[in-house]
Image (cartoon, rainbow, N blue to C red):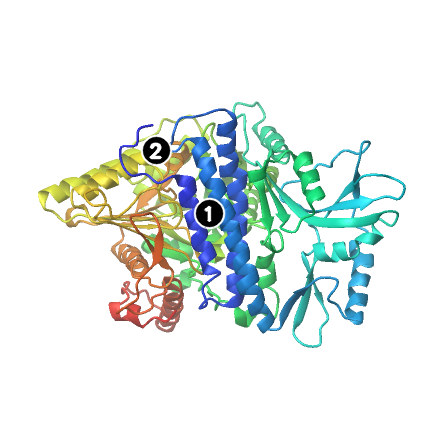
Amino acid sequence: MENRFPYYNRELSWMDFNMRVLEESMKKENPLMERLRFLSISGSNLDEFFMVRVAGVKEQVRADYKTPDPSGLTPQKLLTELNAKTHAFMEKQYSIYTRSILPLLRRCGIRFVDGSDLSPQQQSYVADYFHRVLFPVLTPLAVDTSRPFPFLANKTLNIAVRLSIKKEKGAHFAVVQVPGILPRFLEIPEQEGRTFILLEDLIIHFMPELFDLQKIEACCPFRLTRDSDLEIDEEAEDFLNEIQKSIKRRKHGRPVRLELLSHCDDEIRAFLTDSLKVKPHDIYEITGPLDLTFLGKFAGLSGFESMCYEPVRPVYPPADFWGYENIFDAIREKDRLVHHPYDSFECVVDFVRTAAEDPNVLAIKQTLYRVSGHSPIVAALIRAAENGKQVTVLVELKARFDEENNIIWARKLEKAGCHVIYGLTGLKTHCKICLVVRREEDGIRRYVHLGTGNYNDSTARIYTDLGMFTCRESYGSDASSLFNVITGYSLPPTYHKFAVAPLGLRTFFSRMIEREIENAQKGLPCGITAKINSLVDPEIIGLLYKASSAGVPIFLIVRGICCLTPGIEGVSDNITVISIVGQLLEHSRIFLFENGGNRRVYLGSADWMQRNLDRRIELVFPVEDEDLKARVLEILETMKNDTVNARMQLPDTSYVHIDRRGRGAVNCHRLFADRARQEFEDRKSVKEDKPFQPIRSNDLKEENP
């Protein structure tokens, strides 16, 4: 593919994003336990990157696919660059852990020890735990001519053991799996401070009891990452069964990474390399504990609260907060906007719960992409069906790594009498919409919730998202039309307000960007501000370059992957790109077009990626209420002024922290949290709805990190 404009490779850009996450674990101003959490998140992110993205590149190399991507890299060249970048990344991870985090933990009286560093009383304690809890769960697996190398599930932690047997020549090997069903670490009683031992170190300490007829020559923990991208036959007669088969195949995916301790015994290393058929560049030598994701749970232990962020305490905006006893009355009076997690997600849950119990509600239709393990939304939909309401739910079974959870919920919904749709062939349904049809005195009225994030009460505590409630007829009509397309054979309609992928969203964004170019050429007010998670689509990037060259000022808040390069003279010198990484995960999608002075504000579920524009059902919708529009504009402006969580992308694709010289410290996450609580207290005292008042610029400068 000919590269006609600057385009940065998506996988390399993603690695840059994960480096920004990792950098948060280096920040001295971040609380210690939060630094551990960022280490954990960077590890979890990297796992998924190997399972999907690296695995995909390897598959292209095996297939001898040589066509370069828009950045000009062939799969083989990209794999070479990724190998170098991922090895350097993991070296950085463990350098931070061993050189920065562990000394700080020790300074706070928190220690990780192995079996050789225990007092007699502690030895007795861990021995009791081993024999009473751990030993019954362990299964040592010998590997020899009669017992082949065992199958190892993806991401499980194991210990390879080299043994010698009297009167027998050569090495003998065994594998012991560290049970994932038990906590990864054990706290050991200590007179002062807190002491912990990792499960694998405890097992190694007592390993002789598992092999009492052999001599243990060496032990080495190791971990395997497998290709986990599903291949699904969407034409299968039983789609749910096909998904289940694909999930089972995922467990047997090709190895893409082998993690070993750096001091691994040479014979064990050769044994694992041969048994698992991994290449040298797929082996990652680790200088600390394998699988740093355990640090997330460790940081959440009781007693560490003072070493964590001040929590964001969501405020609940119920109907009476808006001046009404009934939420439907509140929405009928005017559109309502909620900003999660600063505004509690409970208001969305209660919207569905209220609809489930309201005798005037006739039907509920909703899309579900990712939901929690104990979803109150699903429970409310089941209750609605039990109450005799017509309930239709699209459960997207192809939501990566949530397939099993979604299958469970789909079956429960069906059992309760809901009409369950499993998604459309060839498309993922990623839009976030709930439609409630209600009978009222003046006829049927449709109430709609539209959002930028999933109907997931768990992630809504840490993901920033926006949602809008409305009962405008044009929105309700569009919602009905969209569900008719999803559930039946209706032709895509001409929507009044919605822009919907895959048939209309790309055209919509292209038209809006081209209009800004025309306005720039006419000397009219012009400009584009977009907040998205990823910017990958070559066509959109080309249009943004075109707009920049025409003099359109463009400000992009891109959390993760950004294949566009800003600041190139004559190409993108009118484009600014920042990424916000901090206490909360930025997830909302917001689009602002200056539109000749008549500003247009849109929210939606779609990023600027080919998959969102061409291969998914996505929804973007306008915010038309002036108070709500002012609030969204203020949200954008606050994030543009962030000097704590924001980093700016440079023309060489690197990111640097915002220069604070002459500027106050602005942390948008804390500012939004404080603002929501203050507004809640103010409204609670006056019990009336007020027009939105934007945050003053001097308020931004006074905010502390």
Q: Residues within 10 Å of mark 1 (few under 14, many from 20)?
A: many
Q: In which quadrant is the C terminus drawn?
A: bottom left
Residue with the mark numbered 1: 454
Q: Is residue 403 left or right of residue 692?
A: right
> Helix or strand or loop: what does disc 2 sit on?
loop
What is the residue that sits farthest to the bottom in this orientation?
192
Amino acid, disc 2: Pro
Q: Residues within 10 Å of mark 2 (few under 14, many from 20)?
A: many
Q: In which quadrant is the N terminus drawn?
A: top left
Q: Is residue 520 left or right of residue 38?
A: left
Q: Residue at x 26, y 68 (%)?
A: 696
Looking at the rendered structure, which numbered label has been put on residue 70? 2
Residue 69, position in %: x, y?
38, 32
Nearest to the observer: residue 232 or residue 276: 276
Callout in the foreground (2, 1): 2
Could you tell me if residue 179 is visible in this image? Answer: no
Could you tell me if residue 485 is visible in this image? Answer: yes
